[in-house]
Image (cartoon, grey):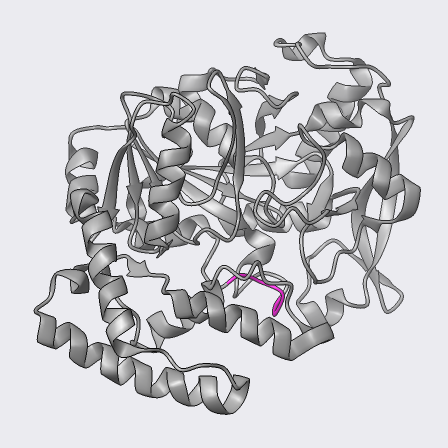
Amino acid sequence: MVTAIVGANWGDEGKGKITDMLSQESDIIIRFQGGSNAGHTIINNYGKFALHLLPSGVFYNHTTCIIGNGVALNIPYLVKEMEEVMAKNVPKPRILVSDRAQLVMPYHIKFDEYEEERLGKASFGSTKSGIAPFYSDKYAKIGFQVSELFADEKILRDKIARVCVQKNVILEHLYQKPAINEEELYQTLRKYKEMVEPYVCDTSAFIQKAIKEGKRILLEGQLGTLKDPDFGIYPMVTSSSTLAAYGAIGAGIPPYEIKKIVAVVKAYSSAVGAGEFVSEIFGKEADELRKRGGDSGEFGATTGRPRRMGWFDAVASRYGCKLQGATSVALTVLDVLGYLEKLPVCVGYEIDGKVTKEFPATTSLAKAKPVYEILPGWKTDIRGIRNYEELPENCRNYIEFIEKELEVPITMVSNGPNREDIIYRNMEKKEIL
């Protein structure tokens, strides 16, 4: 059985916690896209972690964690992250890396930095992790696949020479930066081979065998629907598909094997970086929500940047759930809202004088104004509650209002940062997988 855990919003919805929690009942956890450009914050009995490349199932002895072929693989970052996790007494994770994954190269990170510098105020707000240059090279067929690290020296050197011709022209004439040294690049790839060799295998074959054996498998997505390059708020998006459908490609399995899709939805809205954000709030109102949000405030796990804050956007979240094909929803950080007298919910967009409940493309989205419905708050701390019926009435009303707007059942409610801070609603944990 394969279950995908994906974000319905801008990212930062709490997917890491949900994956960590459901990994207890799972055998294999697979990262299928993205790279070290976004983080999953997890709090468990080992401590607090911000994972970027490692799948969020690394904290269990029984799990196998896979870096799928769709991932932007920064090998030194992966090794560093494993060392940091083990330094906190986490047993050495069982990691497999797809031989078809491609490598984030040092020059990808440099190109990312140079382009943001060149664009200035028109920049995309990149994390400067090399992700856009990486995926550009992958689809231009000049990226380096893990399997190529094991090729004959002449073959590898020939490819390095071809790549450097192109890259160095851009470095010299567009950015006025130093050229890439071919010998240094070759030595870097040799070092990468030594670092990753113990983990490399045909992960697609491994996963398909596990499916036949009836193993429980989680696909872990990065970011959310609104950062998808096709269906997100283009061009302020990431460079790989954030949709559950891409999980089949990024893991190397048939699409029909994905039986369940958990869309993680935040109880309010937040976003990092530029782009349209209809329900955004500002000033003291935003500062207070940011300060209370999450375990240590709403700041990016990778960049540390303060997140932009907003009220719950039912238009964007419903769209996100539909595009993901959600079979259920995990509603997160609900406990954060316990200080508010009133809770605005964006239920529509006014565009050119007309109200719509459909999420539009970016050109129309830029003109959208939020249409709010105001719900009463519950003005109490809900952490520690494990039974849905014990939640305050106004809290349950808020959840059920959102569920009606999303048109997808909310089966999990997260009411705190820790692994055990979860309420299962209308089904047991094992039924979600």
* Picture quadrant of residue 104: bottom left
Q: Residue at x 37, y 23 (%)?
A: 90
* Picture quadrant of residue 58: top left
Above-or-below relation of 29 to 133: above
- From this viewpoint, is residue 54 visible? no
Q: Residue at x 82, y 20 (%)?
A: 394
User: Residue 74: x and y, percent?
Assistant: 37, 54
Above-or-below relation of 414 to 28: above
- From this viewpoint, is residue 177 visible? yes
User: Residue 396: x and y, percent?
Assistant: 74, 20
Q: Quadrant of the N terminus?
A: top left
User: Residue 347: x and y, percent?
Assistant: 79, 46
Q: Front-most of 26 and 137?
A: 137
Image check: 80 left or right of 329? left
Q: Which residues are magenta?
A: 234-238
Image check: 90 left or right of 159? right
User: Residue 275: x and y, percent?
Assistant: 70, 62
The stretch drawn in magenta includes residue 200: no
Image check: 290 left or right of 420? right
Q: Quadrant of the C terminus?
A: top left
Q: Residue at x 55, y 69 (%)?
A: 113
Q: How many marks?
A: 0
Q: Front-most of 355 and 282?
A: 282
